Image (cartoon, grey):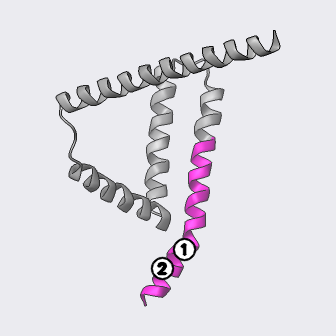
């Protein structure tokens, strides 16, 4: 029974995605058509249409999968141990020092090789 329900949902997914595409087209064309109206009204209208389009998209199987992905990603972000301000500052300083040392080494090597080539070529 579940397979039949999923097949039925998948059949309507195409219709839902067409509705989402139509809503996006309506938002774009409406924004152009009403270009003389104040920008605030146009932004609010596009946002409202975008919310409706997102709601319709979340009703599809791919939309539900995307919502599950977002929930799981949020849970994973909560598990991350973020560095302290001191750790961040120290790491940044180490990176800056290493970059400066490497830049000086490459500049010195480039100057040496340039001088050697100029001596050989004349």
Within the magenta stretch, is there residue 42?
no
Say which residue appears at 62% left-offset and 16% top-offset: 112
Q: Nearer the viewer, residue 122 or 71?
A: 122
Q: On the picture, is 65 further left or further right than 112?
A: left
The mark found on residue 10 in the picture is 1
Q: Which of 70 and 52 is in front in this view?
A: 70
Query: Which picture quadrant has residue 65?
Result: bottom left
Say which residue appears at 49% left-offset and 86% top-offset: 4
Query: Which picture quadrant has residue 51?
Result: top left
Name of the residue lying farthest toward the top: 122
Name of the residue lying farthest toward the bottom: 1
Say which residue appears at 36% left-offset and 55% top-offset: 70
Q: Which of 93 and 76 is in front in this view?
A: 93
Boundaries of the magenta span: 1-25
Q: To which residue does mark 2 refer? A: 6
The mark found on residue 64 in the picture is none
Q: On the picture, is 22 further left or further right than 54?
A: right
Instruction: Determine contact: label 1, label 2, CB under 8 Å.
Output: yes
Within the magenta stretch, is there residue 16?
yes
- Give the crowd class for mark 2: few <14, some 14-19, many >=20 residues within 10 Å: few
> Quadrant location of the C terminus?
top right
Judged by its main secondary structure, the magenta piece is: helix
């Amino acid at each position: 029974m579940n397979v039949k329900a999923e097949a039925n949902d998948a059949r309507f997914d195409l219709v839902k995605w067409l509705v989402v595409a139509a809503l996006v087209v309506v938002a774009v064309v409406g924004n152009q058509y009403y270009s003389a109206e104040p920008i605030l009204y146009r932004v609010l209208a596009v946002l409202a249409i975008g919310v409706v389009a997102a709601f319709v998209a979340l009703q599809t199987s791919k939309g539900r999968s995307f919502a599950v992905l977002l929930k799981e990603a949020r849970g994973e972000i909560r598990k991350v141990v973020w560095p302290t301000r001191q750790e961040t500052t120290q790491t940044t300083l180490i990176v800056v020092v290493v970059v400066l040392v490497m830049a000086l080494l490459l500049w010195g090597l480039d100057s040496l090789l340039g001088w050697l080539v100029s001596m050989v070529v004349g």
